[in-house]
Amino acid sequence: MNALDAKGVKHFFSQNAIYIILVLLIVGIAVADPNFIGITTLRDILLQSSTRVIIALGVAFVLITGGTDLSAGRIVGLSAVVSASMLQMSDYPRKFFPNLPELPIIVPIILAIVVGLIFGLINGIIVAKFHVPPFIATLGSMVIVYGVNSFYFDMKPNQSQPIGGLSKEFSKLGTGYIGPNGTYSIPYIVIIAIVVSFIVWVIFNNTRLGKNMYAIGGNIQAANVSGINVSRNLIYIYAIAGALYGLAGVLEAARTGGATNNYGNMYELDAIAACVVGGVSTAGGVGRVRGILAGVLIFSVINYGLTFVGVSPYWQLIIKGMIIVAAVAFDIRKYVAKK
């Protein structure tokens, strides 16, 4: 193999490492248990990945600008509780709002998404207008949102009881599917995740906001000099991220058939990890939708696949941690090499 061929192979593996890792994971688990390869397994992994994909895409908006968002999981939890509290069956004995009539499903869903958007907007204003570092701003928001959710969840007559008895129409959003039967069907929630992924891809690649987002993450001073309104764009980006967390919270409540104030706990860490493993640079300015999807799938395969073959959850955490550290180290090495 000559030097040119070796360089080409190295470039190929560098550009496609995430997909190679995903294939190797699947092959390794399949060797341990051939029953892992099947339509049912694929469907389950996609189902479990759907809400995580939407959260990761929201986090990616912020990461690409060079920021971070630690409030994502708690906003997911608040949105789940808000939507579930307003979409219970009328005859459920422990309704969150006993006198609330059955609402059209779209009303609480939109309200929950707006709640997420509002908190995302607040994050954006704190970061853009008050120049608080994103880590600190969203750390504070994470605590505040959890407090707000806990107050709401503890309201009488609910008083911190898990919210259940969701309307069949709402539950169908999270558990329904298109197709002849459960095995060879496509869950609604997977379709929603695909549509959201496509919309985000369009924003990233074909809108002024997307171009500005990459410019801000690449060099914020240069973005300012070039005439980009950095503050306004950051506010838009954090608001969109919040809306995506809100949507994920709605779908998570529908998928699981209930909600508590602890929903979404630590989801932001999984989302950040999936983004980083999927090629979103921690330094900002770099990230692709397909890489984010692959990152989410890698962690879903680890969670589902290793449980499938009987690997201890503790080993799963160790493996996930090693992958995250390796991905960040590789990202930093590339960043330093460019400079």
Image: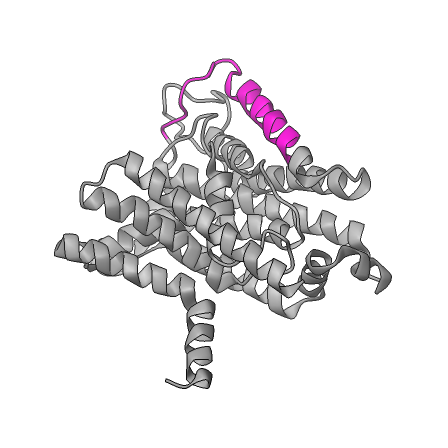
Q: Tag count in the figure? A: 0
Point out the image quarter for the N terminus. bottom left
Residue in the image at 15% along x and 52% along y: 32
Snapshot quadrant of residue 6: bottom left
- Residue 50 percent across, percent down from the top left: 40, 51
Residue 148 among magenta residues: yes
Where 258 falls versus 275 (above or below)? above
Rendered location of residue 151, percent (x, y):
57, 18
In the rendered image, is residue 75 in sight?
yes
Nearer to me, 93 or 330: 330
Residue 98 colored magenta? no
In the displayed orientation, state which residue is furthest to the left.
34
**Which quadrant does the C terminus fall into?**
bottom right
Residue at (58, 22) in percent of width and height: 147
Q: Toward the viewer: 151 or 179?
A: 151
**Residue at image x 42%, y 70%?**
13
Is 91 on the left-hand or right-hand side of 38? Answer: right
- Rendered residue at 61%/50% (across/down): 63
Foreground of the two, 270 or 89: 270
Say above or below: 317 vs 45: above
- Residue 118 location in percent, x, y? 67, 39
Q: Nearer the viewer, residue 215 or 99?
A: 215
Quarter of the view holding residue 207: bottom right
| View extreme (front): residue | 2
State which region is magenta: 138-165
